[in-house]
Amino acid sequence: MNPETERHHNAGSGMESAFRHLTAEEIDFLKSNSCIADDWSDVLVKDGFNPKRVFQCRFSGKVRLGNFEGTFTLPGGIVKKAGVRYATLHNVTVGDDSCIENIHNYIANYEIGSRTYIKNVGLIYVDGQTSFGNGVEVSVLNETGGREVPIHENLSAHEAYMMTLYRHRPELISAMYSLVGEWKRARTSSSGTIGSDVMILNVNTIRNVRIGDSARLEGCDILDDGTVASNVHAPVFIGNSVSCRDFIISSGSHVDDGANLLRCFVGQACHLGRGYSASDSLFFSNCHGENGEACAIFAGPYTVTHHKSTLLIAGMFSFMNAGSGSNQSNHMYKLGPIHHGILDRGSKTASDSYILFPAHVGPFSLVMGRHVSHADTSDLPFSYLIENGNTTCLMPGVNLRSVGTIRDAQKWPKRDRRTDPHRLDHINFNLLSPFTIQKMFNGRRILRDLQRVGGPSSESYLYQSARIRNTSLVKGLKYYDMGICKFMGNSIIKRLEGIEFDSDEQIRRRLVPDTETGGGQWVDLAGLIAPKSEVDRLMERIETGEVTSLGQIEEAFAVMAENYYTYEWRWVYEKLEEFCGVSPDRMTAADVCGIVRSWKDAVISLDRMLYEDAKKEFSLSFMTAFGADGTREEQLRDFEQVRGDFDTNTFVTTVLEHIEKKRALGDELIGRLQHLL
């Protein structure tokens, strides 16, 4: 059992011994309050039970009632006394100081915690054996099946990533299914729990649903076969006209305003509302969906869609923002909706964009227009994909100088709404990492090969059905060089930070990594950036049976996240010679100073590009529609009142401060090494 379930289970077991049979006087009093029971000997109460708080109820099966002495103060100042009134209870335990009132049909087979308020509810019951949504198979990416993910209360984006994409390892999938099956069996029961401090108000039907502490369910239509994994640290809210079937909603999430979910997992601190509709989809930490529709999507952390006209279908996303009218197609031929696509972390779709799957878009790319050529730009990150005459035109690396990219990277950590101390997803927010930098290395090689084969004077080049103009290719090489230089320099400066060196040999010893792990390819497991070797090692342990529980998988991911920077340095160390032209075991203070000077130039150049990009937002053309009916001067003043002044803009001042900070950081290291030159 998870901690919350176990606590309620133990609470129920402990309460068993605290209960006693009703006295004859109590039975007579209850009868006078219009209460009836199939068998009064099956109704147990605690010492101190106040029969005055129980009115017009029907009891059947085993019923246990706590003490009802407390009160509830509702919005508007209404005070309600704890107790049970106008309700039919069958095999129900009611905790201390709870209030159950106006149950239009009945409550059956539930254990209800303390201080819980349930009013104006149609039906709450458990019907037979149920696993409360655990083990429900979600047909993600491929609507017709083949990549199903069995969901459970502790599902992380990283575990789901392996289940979804590593189907070429059938032993792994079989073993993971077995582990989920064990979890499901441990949570299968013919009775449910509603936690303590829960409010359930004006709800139509709740069937086979387990509800954690502090949840608030208000005005829902139907909740059928699922888990509301709420807790006191991160309450769940489910609101008006919401319909959820075969679902799990994780701690801290908010589902409201007519959202309709079928076979969905909703991760921690997600927000789904305003009529959002989703089927066979996975939403992980801090996703936000309003108005639109999702079908068979893998929504990694921070997948955001706001617009009624937007459809996300059969795609894998993370740190993604979908523009209005964004659409994809997973139904290319006559065999059905069998195609899927991947937009790597940080990608965006502009308004009215369209992608015909299969396709793979590289990290931090922008998609504009219609794209039907199934391009694979996974090794060309930070790119623009723009439609021009039904052709995908690719501008590699250009997003490195975009204000929007940097703003996104800054805002994601600030918008982490998770308050649960047990976080399911291990999210790495780094814009530059071995995952993206290795793609820049690959991108440089691809662009140089295109240039070599096509000739440096070619007007354009063709790559993966996408067209790259000569000028874009040349700029892309420059941007990737700057990005790599920035990342490598950052890592070296951090490695040598705060140490006074007496010799080149001492520098070389400090550069030696602390681990053998981290070299080679890195992967992004939907938020967790890690060496593929470690992911492979975990999968092998699962396949061989060394991993015997889902908890051990979670622990392995936690270790990868904790050791990210240790692993990262091993990767940088192995790439130093390729990029810098000198082996780290022969590196001198002069070499380090040269790298730092190049790093400083790259950082400042990129920041200057960001500065110029931000300045465009304050140009006269962007002031159109400001200062209505006024002069140009009034237009300018109106713009400044609404948008502010360029020189005092927070982002602009941050960029300028960053330039000076990085310049000083580089100068400080060079100063520490000056005596060795």
Image (cartoon, grey):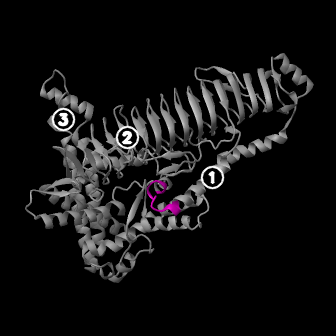
CB under 8 Å between discs 3 and 1: no
Residue range in magenta is 162-172
Whether residue 496 sits left or right of residue 37 in the image: it is left
Name which quarter of the figure residue 176 lies in: bottom right
- State the separation of the CA atoms marked 1 and 2: 30 Å
As drawn, the label of residue 622 is 3
Q: Residue at x 46, y 48 (%)?
A: 145
SS at circle 3? helix
Mark 2 residue type: Leu
Position of residue 358 relative to residue 205, above or below, is below
Residue identified by numbered label 2: 312
User: Which numbered disc covers residue 183?
Assistant: 1
Q: Earlier in the sequence, mark 3 or mark 1?
A: 1
Picture residue at 44% right of the left edge, 34% below the top? 277
- Tell me residue 83's x, y (percent): 74, 25
Q: Secondary structure at mark 2?
A: strand
Q: Taken as a whole, is the magenta stretch helix, strand or loop?
A: helix
Tell me: 652 left or right of 416: left
The Cα atoms of the two marked residues, 3 and 1, are separated by: 56 Å
Instruction: Give the mark nearest the N terminus, 2 or 3.
Output: 2
Tell me which label, 1 or 2, sits earlier in the chain.
Answer: 1
Residue 335, label in figure:
none
Q: Secondary structure at mark 1?
A: helix
Residue 227 drawn at (x, y percent): 59, 41
Name the residue: 20% across, 52% down: 394
Front residue of this view, candidates 47 and 464: 464
Badge nearest the viewer, 2 or 3: 2
163 drawn magenta: yes
Q: Is residue 2 visible?
A: no
Residue 532 seen in the current view: yes
Residue at the front extreme, as displayed: 334
Using the image, determine if residue 602 lies above or below residue 4. below
